[in-house]
Every structure is written in C-alpha cells, then in structure tokens.
Image (cartoon, rainbow, N blue to C red):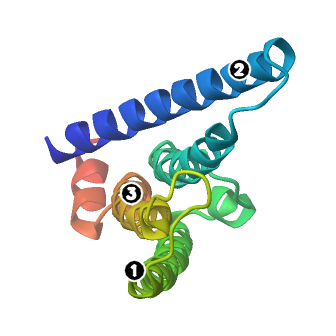
Amino acid sequence: MFDKILTRAENITVAVTFAVMTILAFVNVVSRYALHGSLSWSHEIVTALAVYLIMVGTSAATRLDLHPGFTLLRDTARGWRRVAVVVAIGSMTLAFFVLLGWLGTEQVLTQMGQGRTTPSLALPQWTLSLAIPIGAVLGSIRVIQHTIVSVRTSAPAPADVVDAQTKEA
C-alpha cells in the first residue's frame, strides 16, 4: 500500500512538474517574440521546478532500476556472490543518499537562518533547496526497497529446499 501511494505521488509530481516547466518555458519564449520582453520570474520557477523534478525523478529511476550504473559485476555474479554485490551496491547508494540528505538539510537550515530569498519572486530560498533532502529521503526508501527485492530474487536457495527438490526429481 505504501509503495503504491509513493509511486503514485512520484509519478504525479514528475508529470505535473514537467508540464508546468514546459508551459512556462513556452509562454516565456512566446512573450519574448510577441511582446519583446521576457517574464523574468518564469526562469526562476522553471529552475526551481527542475531541481524538484530531478530529485523526485531520481527516486523514480531507482524504483525502476533505470539509474545509470555499471552492472557488470551484478549481472555476472551468481549465488551468494550476486547477493553480496547487490547488498554492497545498495549500501553504497544508500550511503550516498544519506550524505546528500544530510548536506541538503544543512543547506536548508543555513538558508533559513540567513533569511535568503530568490531574486525575482522573493520566495524563501530554502523552499527551493528543500528538494534535496526530500529527494534524498525518497531515494533512500527506493534503494532499500530495490535492494531487498534484488536480494530476494537472486538469493541462493537454502540447502534443505535444494535437498527436497533433488529427492522429488
């Protein structure tokens, strides 16, 4: 149930964010040619939405196993070696997301303390930077899920199951 809700939230966030970015960029281009002036605030919103899109998209890519990676070791290993490689990869990826979340949170807290705002819209800067720790938390959840599923699908069968299957054959 949690996975379905999170997946739906990721998909909706990515779709809506991309649609808004596309519309704003298009309106800005039309404004430049038709009105001979750009909408200065649109660039700020598109940039902020891009950060959210990237961070939530990273989580979705992790869920779908579409993130870039070198899979030679994982794909060629068998049995317990494959499990060890999958756990090692999951652990390192989780460590990355934890570090990213920690640094992102530090950045948000610093910006909150300084009271920084964006130039055009005067939005609190931390609301834009909040995408980093949010994406890190989502990515961490997805890495843990993906690692568990990968271990379950590649785990060697226990000896007693193998013995029972051998006796039946």
**Apparent side of residue 154 relative to residue 78 in the rendered image (left or right):** left
Q: Specify whether 88 is left or right of 69.
A: left
User: Residue 134: x percent and y percent?
Assistant: 38, 63
Picture residue at 43% right of the left edge, 65% below the top: 124
- Give the residue type at disc 1: Met
For label 2, the SS is helix
x, y percent for residue 106:
45, 87
- Determine the residue positioned at 40% across, 87% down: 113
Quadrant placement of the C terminus: top left
Above or below: residue 18 compared with residue 120: above
How many other residues sit within 10 Å of disc 2, few (<14), some (14-19) or many (≥20)?
few
Q: Which mark is residue 142?
A: 3
Quarter of the image that includes the N terminus: top left
Image location of residue 57, percent across then percent down:
53, 46
The residue at which mark 1 appears reads as 112
At horizontal 62% and vertical 60% (from top left) the residue drawn is: 119
Type of amino acid under label 2: Phe
> Which residue is at 57% across, 63% downward?
78
Residue bearing mark 2: 26
